[in-house]
Image (cartoon, grey):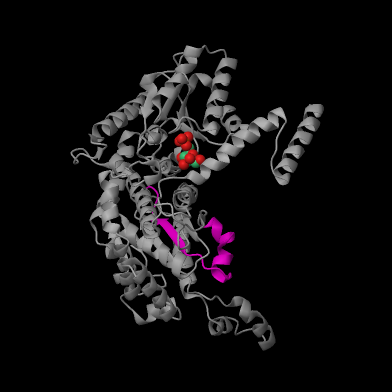
């Protein structure tokens, strides 16, 4: 038996041996539990004490990571080895946030840092020109609105950052258009003036139909507004790894910013894909975001697993996913500005880890990525939290809580923080039948006994609390990088490639075929797909007739 299988089996046995221990009892017997089970990094505090584990569990999980070769794999990630095997690419998002003066990082024998610096500076310059009004539209008017057209990894990271950092916003309004449903673009266009708007087409491949269809529709909008082709061109910029395709679309090379084959879409906000963030909050804030991510990278690459925040996050997730058979995982930011974080995180985790083949192509031997979902605290307390508290499923929760947004502290923001702490405590402690009975002491006995079972909370429901002292660009960078590295570590434990997404490609191919068939008729699919297509054609005839 190899070392990894041995470490895995030991953990399985350990789960059987310790499953009866309740979290509330662990807290009662271990007064120093929080002291031992939290980490701090700059303005971040990571509390993992409310998890179903002891020091022994953590040690066994670290042994598992060691047996999986985590140290070597981290080194490979950092130094530009081709960790994305199925696409033959490095995954160098960490190189994008290296500070000036960092050691060279090589891809295929070429130092990539000069190119990273050059493209970042170009993108920041362009953003500055929009912000200070030196870049003007074709009719000489100042730009007031910036629309980012992209989808998936080319959308969620920047959109989440712009929303999160809204209190740091400067003057230009930044909008996002991702869906090919015309309603998405129309909603933006109806409030915009073509003379004062710049559109950014962000697509690593420059092949994604949603993005290209929307970009074409914007071109038509300019045509309808009487703009010539060259005038329209002044209102476009692009970010892509295929700069030639962007140029062929009619975007002047000086406004095409490179992203790189060796950065995955969902890890790309640190590249010029972050242009909307640069426009929204300015270059200094964007550099702070990079600095925060770099601080987390340094911590990740240099801290022993037992105190390494992303490694602990990942090992705890593996503990629930594979040994306690959790049904999912939820992330709840207690911050209106962070309300897109769950969507960003779902893509990061589920697109990266939803794999059933190991890196060498053989079937995986265990469950891989889990169901990651979330919502904004406190709203989701009034939606799905009932299931977390009293349902039959195990769904560990990450509470992500800024202590303040921009130094503002009032009764409502205190209320939000108090609720995050209270939910984590309630999930952990629960309420026993006796405690529920004591609370209902004033009721007649039959009524009390009828209600008591409904008032019991099983407790023992795990959570992490990730607190940040304020919602700043730096802390946001740390937070996002922590989740990126957590995802990578889970990939190492499961021996899967977190940097490809072949599963998404198949649906894209079929959509192309079906799209043509819906328009032109003949098709030969399974009876269900044919039935759905027939209904579409029937409705189209009816709708065309009604129009
Ligand atoms: O369809 C999913 C996906 O492949 C993501 O991984 C990617 O971020 C997104 O599509 C958009 O791709 P592109 O940046 O090439 O337009």
Q: Is residue 28 magenta?
A: no
- Residue 53 placement (x, y as % from top left): 38, 73
- Residue 438 placement (x, y as % from top left): 56, 84
Q: Quadrant of residue 248?
A: top left
Q: Quadrant of the C terminus?
A: top right
Left or right of residue 513: residue 150: left
Image height of 362 relative to 214, above or below: below
Image height of 436 relative to 510, above or below: below
Left or right of residue 400: residue 104: left
Residue 492 in sight here: yes
Q: Quadrant of residue 234?
A: top left
Q: Quadrant of the N terminus?
A: bottom left
Residue occupying image coordinates x 54% and y 26%: 192
* Image: magenta residue range: 378-406
Left or right of residue 496: residue 292: left
Q: Nearer the viewer, residue 54 or 521?
A: 521
């Amino acid at each position: 038996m190899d070392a990894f299988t041995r470490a895995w089996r030991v953990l399985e046995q350990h789960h059987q041996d310790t499953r009866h221990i309740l979290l509330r009892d662990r807290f009662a017997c271990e007064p120093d539990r929080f002291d031992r089970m939290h980490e701090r990094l700059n303005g971040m505090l990571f509390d993992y004490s409310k998890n179903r584990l002891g020091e022994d569990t953590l040690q066994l999980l670290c042994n598992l990571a060691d047996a999986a070769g985590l140290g070597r794999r981290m080194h490979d990630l950092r130094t530009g080895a081709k960790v994305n095997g199925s696409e033959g690419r490095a995954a160098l998002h960490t190189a994008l946030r290296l500070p000036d003066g960092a050691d060279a990082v090589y891809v295929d024998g070429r130092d990539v840092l000069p190119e990273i610096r050059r493209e970042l500076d170009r993108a920041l310059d362009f953003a500055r020109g929009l912000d200070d009004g030196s870049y003007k539209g074709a009719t000489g008017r100042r730009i007031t609105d910036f629309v980012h057209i992209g989808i998936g990894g080319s959308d969620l990271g920047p959109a989440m950052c712009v929303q999160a950092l809204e209190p740091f916003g400067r003057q230009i309004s930044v909008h996002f258009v991702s869906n090919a449903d015309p309603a998405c673009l129309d909603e933006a266009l109806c409030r915009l003036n073509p003379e004062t708007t710049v559109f950014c087409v962000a697509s690593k491949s420059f092949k994604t139909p949603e993005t290209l269809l929307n970009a074409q529709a914007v071109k038509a909008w300019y045509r309808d507004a009487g703009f010539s082709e060259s005038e329209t061109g002044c209102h476009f910029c692009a970010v892509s790894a295929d700069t030639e395709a962007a140029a062929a679309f009619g975007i002047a090379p000086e406004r095409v910013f490179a992203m790189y084959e060796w950065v995955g879409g969902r890890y790309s906000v640190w590249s010029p894909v972050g242009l909307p963030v640069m426009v929204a909050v300015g270059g200094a804030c964007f550099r702070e975001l990079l600095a925060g991510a770099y601080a987390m990278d340094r911590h990740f690459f240099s801290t022993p697993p037992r105190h390494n925040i992303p490694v602990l996050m990942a090992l705890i997730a593996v503990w629930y996913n594979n040994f306690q058979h959790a049904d999912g995982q939820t992330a709840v930011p207690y911050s209106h500005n962070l309300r897109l974080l769950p969507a960003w995180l779902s893509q990061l985790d589920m697109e990266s880890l939803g794999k059933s083949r190991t890196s060498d192509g053989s079937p995986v031997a265990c469950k891989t990525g889990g169901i990651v979902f979330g919502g904004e605290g406190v709203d989701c307390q009034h939606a799905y939290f009932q299931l977390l508290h009293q349902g039959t499923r195990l769904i560990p929760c990450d509470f992500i809580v800024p202590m303040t947004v921009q130094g503002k502290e009032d009764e409502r923001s205190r209320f939000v923080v108090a609720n995050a702490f209270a939910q984590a405590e309630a999930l952990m402690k629960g309420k026993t039948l006796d405690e529920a009975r004591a609370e209902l002491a004033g009721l007649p006995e039959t009524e009390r006994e009828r209600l008591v079972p409904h008032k019991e909370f099983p407790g023992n429901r795990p959570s992490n609390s990730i607190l940040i002292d304020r919602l700043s660009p730096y802390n946001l960078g740390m937070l996002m990088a922590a989740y990126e590295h957590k995802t990578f570590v889970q990939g190492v434990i499961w021996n899967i490639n977190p940097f490809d997404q072949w599963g998404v490609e198949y649906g894209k191919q079929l959509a192309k075929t079906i799209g043509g068939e819906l328009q032109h008729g003949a098709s030969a699919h399974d009876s269900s797909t044919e039935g759905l297509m027939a209904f579409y054609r029937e409705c189209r005839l009816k709708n065309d007739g009604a129009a």
